[in-house]
């Protein structure tokens, strides 16, 4: 089986597990999400922090995209909505944002959504009236909770794919728990232990595939919950064995939130034959320890990085 066929099999298995929503239902949910984003933009323009934060979940996290699509440059900026509110209030006290917002990519799967937007216009200093051109590409994550779409995270100011290369941040003492969780997840693959893998997942775990390309528009949500992922793993481990070697190349931690990038070297052996397939890939992770232990919230397979 070629690697392309292997990827096709993964996608087809997922689609059997969780059929994609109809275009009509996705369009309806997309309208609601766009309205939420417009509410946030209007709050910024009016200098109304409470209005702007009204779309955020209690566990809202902000990541700094550092103007780059390469996730080796990304860090955790605000680990909770309170920290973000304080920073935003200070920012809006100094300047008014006269900006328009364009949605460049929106994808909804069940109760999960990802949205890329570009904000452009002017920032106007409140003391002098000076106007400065403004442009920022931002990546929002939404989750439907109790029939309401709420923002769970924001990657602020990402997007210049000409930047780089980046070397990543080494894991320090504060990241020990993050490293332990990611290594335990990798060991689960080598041991063929589905339980060991899923025990490291957050209840809202979501998996994406970036297809080894820059540009959020290539991303596909392949699993929108840990249950679907567990079912797929169980079927895969009935047919295949894995050997996983993982190098952790970038970690950023702030409070109870973290992000990381790993370089994975995986060898797949099929039990019905002698064929082996090797794959080297980078994976982007977000993690949280709100539950007490570090758990994986998002996994983005096949991310691209500048050498």
Image: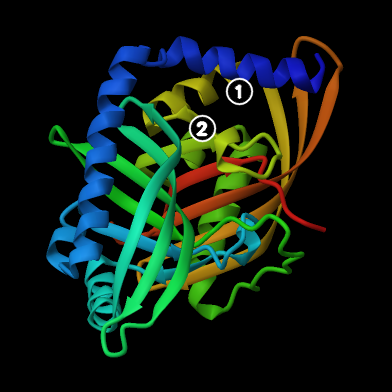
x 49%, y 14%: residue: 15
Decide: few, some or many residues near mark 1? Use Cα within 10 Å; few <14, some 14-19, many ≥20: some
x 56%, y 63%: residue: 179
- Give the farthest residue toward the bottom: 127
Left or right for 64, reference 33: right
Q: Foreground residue, 139 or 204?
A: 139
Q: Foreground residue, 150 or 95?
A: 95
Residue identified by numbered label 1: 237
For the N terminus, give its image quadrant. top right
Disc 1, disc 2: CB below 8 Å?
yes
- Work out whether 290 lies above or below 110: below
For the C terminus, give its image quadrant. bottom right
Where residue 181 appears, as percent x and y from the top left, is: 51, 56
Rounded to the nearest whole Å, what is the CA distance between mark 1 and mark 2?
8 Å
x 86%, y 18%: residue: 275
Dot 1 lies on which element? helix
- Work out whether 290 lies above or below 190: below
Query: Residue 191's image quarter?
Result: top right
Dot 2 lies on which element? helix
Query: Residue 44's image quarter?
Result: bottom left
Mark closest to the chain's N terminus, 1 or 2: 2
x 58%, y 64%: residue: 67
- Work out whether 6 lies above or below 42: above
Q: Is residue 8 visible?
A: yes
**Numbered mark located on residue 194 in the image:** 2
């Amino acid at each position: 089986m070629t690697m392309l066929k292997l990827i096709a099999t993964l996608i087809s298995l997922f689609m059997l597990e969780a059929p994609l929503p109809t275009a009509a239902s996705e369009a309806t949910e997309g309208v609601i999400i766009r309205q939420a984003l417009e509410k946030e933009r209007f709050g910024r323009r009016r200098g109304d922090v409470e209005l702007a934060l009204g779309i955020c979940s209690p566990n809202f996290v902000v990541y700094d995209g550092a103007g780059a699509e390469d996730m080796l440059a990304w860090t955790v900026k605000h680990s909770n909505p309170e920290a973000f509110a304080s920073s935003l209030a200070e920012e809006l006290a100094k300047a008014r944002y006269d900006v328009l917002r364009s949605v460049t990519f929106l994808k909804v799967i069940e109760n999960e959504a990802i949205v890329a937007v570009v904000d452009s216009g002017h920032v106007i200093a409140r003391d002098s009236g000076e106007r400065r051109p403004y442009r920022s590409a931002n990546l929002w994550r939404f989750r439907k909770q109790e029939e309401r779409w709420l923002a769970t995270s924001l990657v602020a100011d990402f997007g210049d794919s000409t930047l780089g290369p980046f070397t990543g941040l080494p894991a320090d003492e504060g990241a020990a728990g993050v490293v332990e969780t990611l290594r335990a997840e990798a060991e689960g693959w080598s041991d063929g232990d589905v339980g060991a893998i899923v025990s490291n997942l957050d209840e809202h775990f979501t998996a994406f595939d970036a297809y080894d390309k820059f540009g959020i528009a290539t991303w596909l949500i392949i699993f929108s919950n840990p249950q679907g992922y567990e079912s797929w793993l169980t079927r895969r481990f009935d047919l295949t064995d894995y050997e996983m070697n993982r190098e952790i190349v970038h970690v950023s931690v702030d409070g109870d939130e973290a992000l990381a990038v790993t370089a994975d070297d995986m060898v797949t052996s099929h039990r019905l034959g002698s064929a082996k397939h090797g794959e080297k890939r980078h994976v982007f992770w977000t993690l949280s320890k709100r539950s007490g232990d570090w758990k994986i919230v998002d996994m983005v397979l096949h991310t691209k990085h500048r050498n």
